[in-house]
Amino acid sequence: MRKILFLVLAMLVVSSCAEELIEKPDSLIPEDKMVSIIKEMAIVNAAKGTNLSRLRENGVEPSVYIFNKFKIDSAQFVNSDRYYASKPLQYENMYKKVESDLEELRLKIEEEKKVRDSLSLIEKNKKNIDLKTNDSTKTKKVQK
């Protein structure tokens, strides 16, 4: 009797885990596009946190900008986000992808900044050398 009860209970647990909590929306945003949207939202929110006045000056509303860029509406985003959130492992993998993409972007920007800084330093040193050369040439001419 206990074995049968355990078996029935195990079947109920397995069948309830396979059940979808939220129905798949008709206008579901594909996972890869959703990752791109979330990544863009993170970037725009970071910009909003540091340069809100500049965004306002240019008439940029962050969420509207993103929805227009990806050709979606807020309801489609909310429904898709809710659907993916009902699948925790898939949702976690999406956010891990967003995190790794943002980290790659950060490293790329840091590398570009190092190159720009190095070029600026070389240009500055070159100007200083040119100025010193011109000064020493003028001084020599005066001494003659």
Image (cartoon, rainbow, N blue to C red):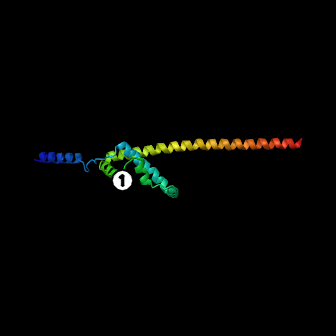
Which residue is rendered at x = 44% and y = 43% of the image?
101
The secondary element bearing badge 1 is classed as helix
Q: Where in the figure is residue 126, as x and y percent of width and height?
A: 70, 41
Q: Position of residue 63 (x, y in %)?
A: 42, 54
Q: Residues within 10 Å of mark 1 (few under 14, many from 20)?
A: few
- Most extreme residue toward the left is 1
Question: In the image shown, does 19 or 64 lie closer to the viewer?
Answer: 64
The residue identified by callout 1 is: 74
- Seen from the viewer's position, the closer of residues 47 and 115 is 47
What residue is rendered at 25% in x and 49% in y? 23
Residue 139: x %, y % from top left: 84, 44
Specify whether 77 is left or right of 23. right
Say whether residue 80 is left or right of residue 100. Answer: left
Q: Quadrant of the C terminus?
A: top right
Seen at 17% across and 45% down, the residue is: 11
Residue 82 at x, y = what percent?
31, 52
Of the residues shown, which amino acid type is indicated by label 1? Ser
Number of marks present in the image shown: 1
Relative placement, left or right, of 64 versus 2 is right
